[in-house]
Image (cartoon, helix red, strand yellow):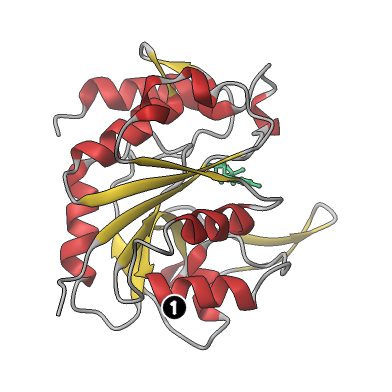
Amino acid sequence: MDSVKFWAVVPAAGVGKRMNADRPKQYLELAGKTVIEHTLYRLLSAGVFEAVAVAISIEDPYWPELEVSAHDKVITAAGGKERADSVLSALKSIRDLASDNDWILVHDAARPCITSTDIHFLIDSLADDAVGGILALSSHDTLKNVQSGSILGTLDRSHIWRALTPQMFRYGSLKLALEIAEGNPAITDEASALELQGLQPKIVEGRPDNIKITRPEDLALAQFYMEHQHD
Ligand code: C5P
């Protein structure tokens, strides 16, 4: 039997409206490169992936300009309407290469501070797991349930974790879960598609420097983290 392989999938077809920038946030400059170049070179240098399938908007003029788009381990797929559509499209782009049992690590293009330690920790923690799981962080803030500006209640934060990426699942079960969930707005990450199948993905504690670029000030924070990371 062939040994299980690892593939990375990077949804990168979002616009990133909250950045108020002239281009999608993954093409903003950060420490001399675009955000997505940092993300992809970090995934490639982890040394575990057969290939990285990147979902790009079909109207994206920036992607073909980047050297990394022609890297021999980078596969370009068409992005979709929502993040889940983009991930499914990237999965379909490797259907002739990947086996149902292979592991897929889905990682946001907008998380350029991902480290090899986090990637290897996730893989080592879940390699023998039946379902898979995600990097996540416990919540240190008190969390409120709010409607129309008023607090309805306080959540028990001991049970609350913030979902990060990569999220690691088997090719076959992830593709099936996303196909069944297609069009469901509640599917904002891969784990939620698996949860809908009644499965219980695992939590693996990630590093807090694995931030998602969402607002303009996140670029300076990402640069600070990069300057202080040693792996
Ligand atoms: O907007 P948000 O930060 O939640 O997006 C997370 C990731 O999903 C980003 O890397 C973004 O480019 C990607 N995405 C996508 N296709 C969409 C929407 C978002 O690939 N339709």
Q: Quadrant of residue 112?
A: top left
Q: Quadrant of the C terminus?
A: top left
Say which of 119 and 203 sits in front.
119
Q: Residue furthest bottom?
A: 198
Q: Quadrant of ligand 1?
A: top right
Looking at the picture, how far across and down is residue 114, in whole percent? 31, 40
| Quarter of the image where the N terminus is located | bottom left
User: Measured from the top left, where is residue 188 in percent x and y?
Assistant: 60, 60
Q: Is mark 1 within 8 Å of ligand 1?
A: no
Q: Residue furthest front?
A: 96
Front in this rendered view, residue 9 or 15: 9
Residue 132 seen by the camera: yes
Identify which residue is drawn at 20% across, 70% down.
4
Is the residue 142 above or below the residue 55 in the image? below
Neighbourhood count class around disc 1 (C-alpha, 10 Å): few under 14, some 14–19, many 20 upward: some
Residue at x 50%, y 53% (from the top left corner): 90
> Three-letter amino acid code at disc 1?
Ser
- Name the residue that disc number 1 marks: 173
Q: Is residue 207 above or below residue 201?
A: above
Where residue 81 sits in the image (x, y, percent)? 71, 50
Q: Residue at x 57, y 27 (%)?
A: 25
Q: Nearer the viewer, residue 103 or 120?
A: 103
Image quadrant in which you'd find residue 197 = bottom right
Asked if residue 135 shows in the view, the reply is no
Asked if residue 150 lies left or right of residue 48, the reply is: right
Q: Secondary structure at mark 1?
A: helix
Q: Is residue 217 left or right of residue 124?
A: right
Q: Residue at the spot x=44%, y=26% of the render?
A: 35
